[in-house]
Image (tube, rainbow, N blue to C red):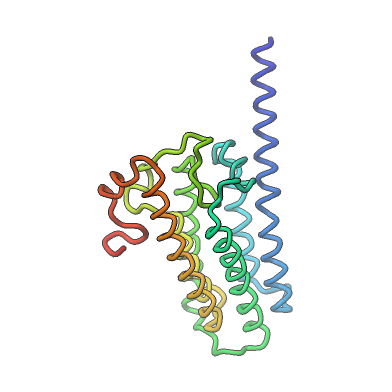
């Protein structure tokens, strides 16, 4: 009876952690919705609802598929988070919201010529593929932290399965695909400017994180020899 009670208690605790993960994950989604609909002034903007819907679905999928220890880790900022990454995270957050702000204003005031409607659907597909790659990377890597740090407290070691067989930072590859897709989805040339800025920041973070892992994580140099590319197979 005690063992059964313990198992039930563990399941209840895991369920609470996952629900908490959904709640915490929905906070940035809510902020994105406020920025999009506030800047556009259009509560019926269908592509904005699709965008928010994709983020909501991804948040739920991640919260109920990731290891609970990873959900807990991602909901707290590690004390050993790199100082340079603290700055980069803030810049990436601002630039990501800037994309939505610019896209909304462009939709509202038609500041730049609209991208043809025919590329919107491919943009949605590319966005979903990018997010899918991000989810695959997160589910494959038990150390898929939201910040750059060596997780000594969790027995951090090299992950080489799933998409990590092809590139060393598939999560960033997925995010970059999403950034490329967003101006197409929102049919906004002007949104492409902050998107390029965000991609630049992601590439910079990839390089810094890769160097940190090489210097501080045992076995990473050997892994780099087997998987030589950071973001794009055959390119870099």
Kindly identify the residue that appears in the image at 69 percent across and 23 percent down.
9
Q: Is residue 33 left or right of residue 159?
A: right
Q: Is residue 182 left or right of residue 52?
A: left
Front in this rendered view, residue 80 or 102: 80
Front in this rendered view, residue 140 or 216: 216
**Position above or below: 49 against 11:** below
Tell me, yes or no, if residue 226 can be seen here: yes
- The spot of residue 120 in percent (x, y) is 51, 74
Tell me, yes or no, if residue 125 can be seen here: no
Kindly identify the residue that appears in the image at 44 percent across and 55 percent down.
209
Q: Is residue 226 left or right of residue 159?
A: left
- The spot of residue 219 in percent (x, y) is 33, 41
Quadrant housing residue 30: bottom right
Quadrant the N terminus occupies: top right
Kindly identify the residue that appears in the image at 65 percent across and 66 percent down.
49
**Position above or below: 137 against 152:** below
Q: Is residue 155 left or right of residue 31?
A: left
Front in this rendered view, residue 87 or 144: 87
């Amino acid at each position: 009876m005690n063992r059964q009670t313990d198992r039930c208690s563990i399941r209840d605790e895991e369920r609470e952690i996952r629900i908490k993960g959904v709640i915490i994950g929905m906070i940035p989604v809510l902020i994105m919705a406020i920025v999009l609909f506030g800047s556009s002034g259009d509560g019926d903007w269908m592509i904005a609802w699709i965008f928010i819907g994709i983020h909501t679905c991804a948040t739920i999928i991640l919260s109920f598929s990731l290891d609970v220890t990873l959900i807990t880790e991602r909901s707290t900022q590690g004390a050993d988070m790199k100082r340079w990454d603290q700055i980069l995270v803030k810049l990436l957050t601002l630039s990501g919201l800037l994309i939505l702000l610019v896209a909304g204003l462009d939709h509202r005031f038609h500041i730049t010529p609209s991208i043809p409607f025919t590329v919107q659907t491919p943009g949605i597909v590319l966005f979903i593929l990018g997010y899918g790659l991000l989810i695959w990377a997160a589910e494959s890597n038990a150390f898929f932290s939201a910040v750059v740090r060596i997780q000594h407290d969790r027995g951090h070691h090299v992950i080489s399965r799933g998409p990590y067989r092809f590139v060393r930072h598939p999560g960033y590859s997925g995010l970059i695909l999403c950034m490329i897709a967003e101006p197409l989805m929102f049919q906004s040339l002007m949104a492409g400017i902050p998107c390029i800025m965000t991609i630049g920041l992601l590439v910079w973070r990839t390089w810094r994180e890769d160097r940190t892992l090489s210097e501080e994580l045992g076995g990473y140099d050997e892994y780099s020899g087997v998987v030589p590319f950071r973001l794009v197979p055959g390119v870099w």
